[in-house]
Amino acid sequence: MNKEILNITTKPKSLTLRDLDYPFDEKYIAQRPARERDRSRLLVYNRLDESVVHSQFRELIQFLPPDCLLVLNDSKVIPARIMGRKAKTGGAVEILLLKELAPNRWRALTSPGLALGQRINLGVRGIYAEVVGVLAGAQRVIDFILEGNIDEHLERVGQTPLPPYIKRPRGALRSDRENYQTVYAHHPGSVAAPTSGLHFTETLLEKLRKAKTELAFITLHIGYATFQPLDQQALAENKLDTESFSVSKSTARQINRAKSEGRPVVAVGTTTVRCLESAVVGECYVRSGTGSTELFITPGFQFKIVDALITNFHLPRSSLLALVGAFSGLAKIKKLYALAQQEGYRFYSYGDAMLIL
């Protein structure tokens, strides 16, 4: 196993997008969540002895390292998908909010061809959108024209921003607004869910607390970086969009105490990993406060904080797959993904989970 990782990480700059490909059958894409969140399946992989165990997420407690600290991302998904019509022609327009730039001003992905100054009706009296900036590709700067702040009206004008591989011909279902949100979501700001956290229930969290598993929460608002396509063949040439994060003083104390005591830090999701590894100070501690990160973790990265990872099964040619490959060896991840398909695991946002020890 050590040799395998070494072979992958000696020349990280030589890695290309092709290295992030793997054979995949789209029938394994989960279109609906598990009926009960914690009844999703769990593949447990131990890097030390390369053992694999198949279980259910509700059995997570028996696989977590003793005395570990479990760190979760409590960012809350906003209704960031907005449907409207061009004021002049009535043509349909789709807007996906990416990042708030100022009150009522957002950077967004839009339908192709929206021109500067174009006004969009949103179907709610007194609320409009207008293109005030043209960025690369289909990205635009959008101003919302209304009395007050658009944040107060997103529940009325917006929909749950499901990934495009979850097929909803008529848009997100009412149930998606609850299902595509962790039970511990607290701080609004994400345009995609931290999907590894979707498997947790209030009951499971309470069991973890009773079992003396320490929990800590960070906030990283998930933006374009999470689903941004990698367009450069050489991974080293790709850049990720900026995402903002926050680590409270109490969470920093919990993490730093765990590291000083030699207790494992288990990250729930790739977004938690990016936050923790971006907040590093010194060799193995994190700082509290707010910040932003463009960190692109690829094979060869040296993890300073995260010792174990809970994650879903990710898309080919994605930054998420690169991160997981960096954590456990890209060749090994491909083998595990092949095994998961053989065993009928469900992939992507509403799919099953892995615990990498």
Image: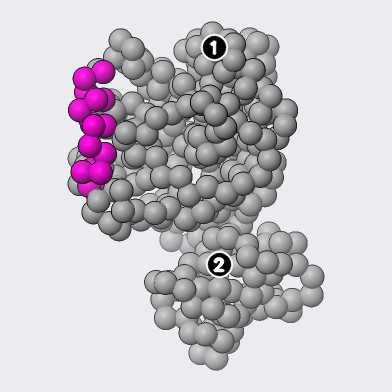
Q: Which residues are magenta?
A: 2-17
The amino acid type found where label 1 is placed reads Gly
The amino acid type found where label 2 is placed reads Arg
Quadrant of the rendering where the C terminus is positioned: top left
Give x and y (percent) for residue 7.
20, 28
Check if residue 10 falls in the magenta segment: yes
Residue 253, quarter of picture = top right
Residue 244 appears in view: yes
Residue farthest along the front direction in this orientation = 282
> Which residue is more in the foreground, 296 or 19?
296
Q: Nearer the viewer, mark 1 or mark 2?
A: 1
Q: How many marks?
A: 2
Residue 338, quarter of picture = top left
> Which residue is more in the foreground, 135 or 260?
260
Q: Few, some or many C-alpha atoms within 10 Å of disc 2 (few <14, some 14-19, many ≥20)? A: many
User: Which residue corresponds to the image point at 60% horizontal and 30% vertical from the top-left?
Assistant: 286
96 lies above or below 124: above
Residue farthest along the bottom direction in this orientation = 88
Residue where numbered disc 2 is placed: 107
348 displayed left or right of 91: left
Which mark sits nearer the N-terminus, 1 or 2?
2
Label ID, residue 262: 1
**Which is the main secondary structure of the residues drawn in magenta?**
helix
Q: Few, some or many C-alpha atoms within 10 Å of disc 1 (few <14, some 14-19, many ≥20)? A: few
